[in-house]
C-alpha cells in the first residue's frame, strides 16, 4: 500500500512545508472548517494560504520522493510536471503545445526521470516555448 503524505506550498511566506500531515499548524487549519446553512463546509480563509500536494508513492531515479507539482527531467532536459487527473497521478508535458495535444501519461511507469524542481519554487523551468 502507498504511503499517504502531503507537503504544502505556503503562499504567504513563499516556502515549501514538508510532511504537513504532522505539522500542527496545518492540522489546526484542517479542523477550522465552518458549516454553511446547506450543510456544506467552507475552509477558513487562513487555509487559502496553502496549496497541498500529495506524495505519489514513487521515487525518482535518485531515490527522491515524487509529489504533485514536481518538475521532472530526463537526461538533463526539463520534460514533465506531475499532476493529478481522473484519479491518477500523471505526467504533463512542460511544453505548452504538447500539454494540450499529447496524452497525459500515468506516472506509475516513469521512475527513470529525476525531480529537478517544483512549479512553485522553480517557475523558470516551465517557461519553455
Image (cartoon, rainbow, N blue to C red):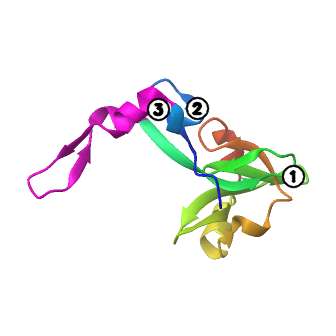
Kindly report which numbered mark, 3 or 2, lies closer to the viewer in this rendering.
2
Residue 115 coordinates in the image, percent (x, y): 77, 47
Residue 55 coordinates in the image, percent (x, y): 62, 50
Q: Is residue 69 above or below residue 104?
A: above
Label 2, label 1: how far apart the Cα atoms are: 22 Å
Q: Which sits earlier in the primary sequence, circle 2 or circle 1?
A: 2
Closer-to-camera residue (19/125): 19
- Residue 11 tag number: 3
Q: Secondary structure at mark 3?
A: loop
Q: Which sits earlier in the primary sequence, circle 1 or circle 3?
A: 3
Judged from this view, the residue extending furthest toward the top is: 13
**Mark 3 residue crowding within 10 angstroms, few (<14) / some (14–19) / many (20+):** few
Closer-to-camera residue (32/127): 32
- Residue 128 tag number: none
> What residue is disc 1 on?
61
> What residue is disc 2 on?
16
For residue 108, side relative to residue 31 (left or right): right
Q: Which residues are magenta?
A: 23-49
Judged from this view, the residue extending furthest toward the right is: 75
Residue located at (87% from left, 52% from top)? 61
Amino acid at each position: 500500500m502507498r504511503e499517504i503524505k502531503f507537503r504544502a506550498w505556503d503562499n504567504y511566506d513563499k516556502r515549501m512545508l514538508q510532511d504537513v500531515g504532522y505539522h500542527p499548524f496545518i492540522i489546526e487549519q484542517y479542523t477550522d472548517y465552518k458549516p454553511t446553512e446547506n450543510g456544506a463546509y467552507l475552509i477558513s480563509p487562513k487555509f487559502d494560504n496553502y496549496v497541498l500536494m500529495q506524495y505519489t508513492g514513487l521515487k525518482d531515479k535518485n531515490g527522491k520522493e515524487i509529489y504533485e507539482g514536481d518538475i521532472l527531467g530526463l537526461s538533463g532536459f526539463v520534460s514533465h510536471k506531475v499532476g493529478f487527473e481522473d484519479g491518477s497521478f500523471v505526467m504533463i508535458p512542460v511544453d505548452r503545445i504538447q500539454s494540450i495535444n499529447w496524452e497525459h501519461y500515468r506516472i506509475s511507469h516513469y521512475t527513470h526521470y529525476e525531480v529537478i524542481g517544483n512549479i512553485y519554487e522553480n517557475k523558470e523551468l516551465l517557461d519553455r516555448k
